[in-house]
Amino acid sequence: AQKITQTQPGMFVQEKEAVTLDCTYDTSDPSYGLFWYKQPSSGEMIFLIYQGSYDQQNATEGRYSLNFQKARKSANLVISASQLGDSAMYFCAMREGRNYGGSQGNLIFGKGTKLSVKP
Amino acid sequence: NAGVTQTPKFRILKIGQSMTLQCTQDMNHNYMYWYRQDPGMGLKLIYYSVGAGITDKGEVPNGYNVSRSTTEDFPLRLELAAPSQTSVYFCASSRDSVTSGNTIYFGEGSWLTVV
């Protein structure tokens, strides 16, 4: 079973509108963390936002927010007021503790969602 | 602000050749990592290091070797290159273990093709 599932291979959004990128995860570790990264066409990986499993509030970073629904095991990324520069691949990733198969360096990545922002 | 720097950015290798991907970071991070990204996929961990002199295998270590003689440098060695190693390679670093929620900072990637 996949640990990180991103069901949207590609999405389109109109400039200035909000968009939600889906991510569901599977873990039995009570202490885990979820990351979102952006990968533009130039290839680098850019950290966007982090949510810890014990964090009481949903994480926010500027125009990015994470809609964390623990019972549903989902951690959707919401981008408000989309800009042309938001066009990129977006990856959801999870880290687990060592006792649950994780290692200190192992972020488990989903396959990504390609977001295209239309002018 | 250099961050994580990796070289070369592009390389074509013939089957059976060897090469080293260089990686250096100037943030004094303890942890360093090598990931590979195959087309249309997310990243998978090859090797990681928690400090100078200490390395450990990740999810896909076969065909690779690493060393960590200094805090700054973490080179990845490919011995006897195979077409299956055609991929984009990312070096990364973090201040502490990612299990504590610290984010990982990535280099710009190295595109490697084995023909």
Image (cartoon, rainbow, N blue to C red):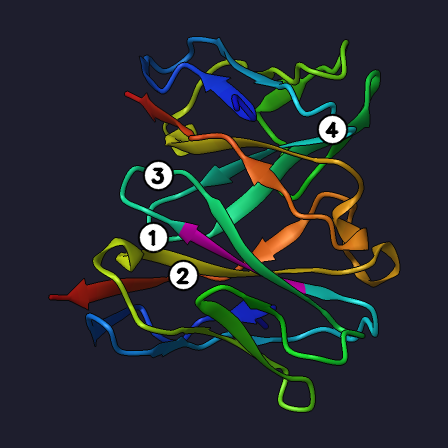
Q: Work out whether disc 2 and disc 3 sit on a shared chain.
A: yes
Q: In the image as oriented, which residue stretches furthest toward the front?
A: A62
Residue A57 in the image, given as x and y percentages of width and height:
70, 79
Q: Work out whether disc 2 and disc 4 sit on a shared chain.
A: no
Q: Secondary structure at mark 1?
A: loop
Query: Badge 3 sits on which subunit?
Result: A
In the foreground, A43 or B47: A43
Task: Identify the mark nearer the N-term, 2 or 3.
Answer: 3
* Camera-side mark, 4 or 3: 4
Q: Residue at x 62, y 71 (%)?
A: A59
Question: Which quadrant holds residue A115?
Answer: bottom left
Q: Secondary structure at mark 2?
A: loop
Residue extent of the magenta highlight = A34-38
Query: Badge 2 sits on which subunit?
Result: A
Disc marking residue A112: 2
* Camera-side mark, 2 or 3: 3
Q: In the image as oriented, which residue stretches furthest toward the right?
A: A99
In this figure, which residue is indicated by the disc labeled 3? A43
Mark-to-mark CA distance, 2 and 4: 27 Å
Q: Secondary structure at mark 4?
A: loop
Mark 4: few/some/many CA within 10 Å (<14, 14-19, 20+): some
Judged left or right of residue B97, residue A61 is left
In this figure, which residue is indicated by the disc labeled 4? B29
In this figure, which residue is indicated by the disc labeled 1? B40
Query: What is the three-letter code of the residue carrying label 2?
Result: Gly
Query: What is the three-letter code of the residue carrying label 3?
Result: Gly
Q: Are marks 1 and 2 in contact (CB under 8 Å)?
A: yes
